[in-house]
Image (cartoon, rainbow, N blue to C red):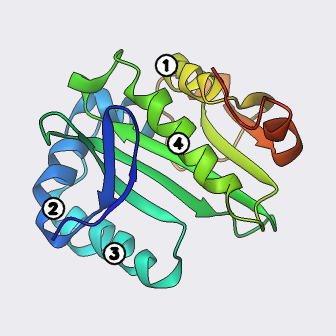
Amino acid sequence: MREVVLETERLSLRRLTQADEEHLWDLDRDPAVMRFLTGGRPTPREVVREEVLPLILSGYGRWEAYGRWAAEEQATGEFLGWFALRPLADESGAVELGYRLRRSAWGQGYGAEGARALVRRAFAQPEVARVVAFTMTANLASRRVMERAGLRHVRTFFADWPEVIEGSEEGDVEYALTRAEWEGTRAGRVR
């Protein structure tokens, strides 16, 4: 049974299941999708099966409002990628927004649409004071999604990553939106 947790104008977000192994592997083996994550190296299928998917599924038992959800186009049911909200371990009241979309879904506004919906979902939780998102400075498309979801650039920083990938010399960026800022944008209607 598909457990839809959130719908937008064009997207359905549902819990991932074991049956999504192929979708996740297909997503993570596209070099363009993985460019700013692994330098384009694909995630091996066994890693998706034995590490990634079990971690995602275990999150559903821990949190009601948070997790990683499959994004499907409502009109066709096509798997487009995923969106996520997860509490930050080192900052009380903060949740991290994440997303990963198939290349075929890029440039169509799905990223901003899903991200805006998750920002609303986050601030529907009374304990959430801030939504944050991170990406490489060079990942301009992801930064645009964050901005279109209402997040603002907070800082540029240089993390100590185990491997250097193209663009990492420019550092990483943090974007954020506080509850007060969100409430000040006409009850969260960010455009």
Task: Say which label, 1 or 4, has the lower sequence index.
Answer: 4
The residue lying at 50 percent from left, 28 percent from top is 112
Give the residue type at disc 4. Ala
Look at mark 1 in the image and give the residue it sits on: 141
Dot 4 alpha-carbon crowd within 10 angstroms: few under 14, some 14 to 19, many 20 or more? some
Q: Nearer the viewer, residue 163 or 15?
A: 15
Q: State whether residue 187 appears in this view.
A: yes
Give the residue type at disc 2. Glu
Give the residue type at disc 1. Ala
Give the residue type at disc 3. Leu
Look at mark 2 in the image and give the residue it sits on: 21
Badge 3 marks a residue whose secondary structure is helix
Look at mark 3 in the image and give the residue it sits on: 57
Q: CA distance from mark 3 to mark 4?
A: 21 Å
Task: Say which label, 3 or 2, has the lower sequence index.
Answer: 2
- The image quarter containing residue 8 is top left
Residue 160 drawn at (x, y percent): 66, 47
Dot 1 alpha-carbon crowd within 10 angstroms: few under 14, some 14 to 19, many 20 or more? few
Q: Is residue 139 left or right of residue 172?
A: left
Task: Say which label, 2 or 4, has the lower sequence index.
Answer: 2
Residue 55 drawn at (x, y percent): 38, 74
Query: Where residue 117 is drawn, which disc sits there?
Result: 4
Q: CA distance from mark 1 to mark 4?
A: 18 Å
Q: CA distance from mark 2 to mark 4?
A: 25 Å
Query: Where residue 150 is drawn, which disc sits there?
Result: none
Tell me: residue 89, above or below residue 147: below
Task: Say which label, 2 or 1, has the lower sequence index.
Answer: 2
